[in-house]
Amino acid sequence: MQYKDFINLQQLSSSLIKNKKVDTEGNIMNWLKVKCFEYKTNNPYIVELKCLYSKPFPISHEKKKDLLKLCEKNVIPDIMFHTFYKSLPSIPLKKDKAPEPGESDSELDED
């Protein structure tokens, strides 16, 4: 998966889900038991789904360093993967953290 595969569903949720306590048949909705959602293209409510992130978010320098060591030792195969790991953006963080959905990409610096 890539960063552009993650979709921001916040707009969809606020515009289409009106009553969050009952389903379309009037049954009480238990959100903890929901396993999947189905969206059909023939639905009259067409909402443009936007990507959650506009660019890859960086990992810590330490994690990138460890991944590159695995590449050097050929623990990670060279076929396609070395280039990917070398191109990962990184920042000096002690802990890796994905940006929150409302957090702008510009708040994270890349190297």
Image: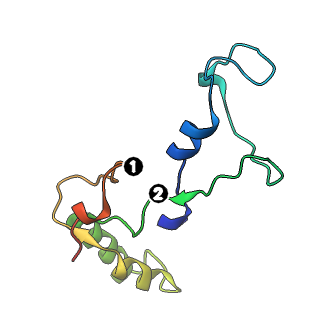
Secondary element under disc 2, as helix, strand or loop, is loop
Q: Residues within 10 Å of mark 2 (few under 14, many from 20)?
A: many
Residue 104 placement: quadrant:
bottom left
Q: Residue at x 28, y 70 (%)?
A: 64
Split into 4 quadrants, where in the image is the C terminus? bottom left
Q: Which residue is mark 2?
A: 52
Left of 102 or right of it: where is 111? left
Q: Quadrant where the N terminus lies?
A: bottom right
Q: For the residue marked with disc 2, what is the amino acid?
A: Leu
Which is nearer the eye, 2 or 79? 2
Q: How is the image coloured?
A: rainbow
Q: Residue 38, how many percent across, how many down?
A: 75, 43
Q: Nearer the viewer, residue 66 or 57?
A: 57
Asked if 23 appears above or below 41 in the picture, the reply is above
**Circle 2/circle 1 CB separation < 8 Å:** yes
Lower position in the chain sequence, tag 2 or tag 1: 2
Q: What's the residue at 33%, 53% (across, down)?
A: 99
* Residue on which disc 1 sits: 101
For this rendering, which residue is in front, 74 or 80? 80
- Residue positioned 72% across, 46% down in the render: 45
Residue 83 image position (x, y, % from top left): 42, 85
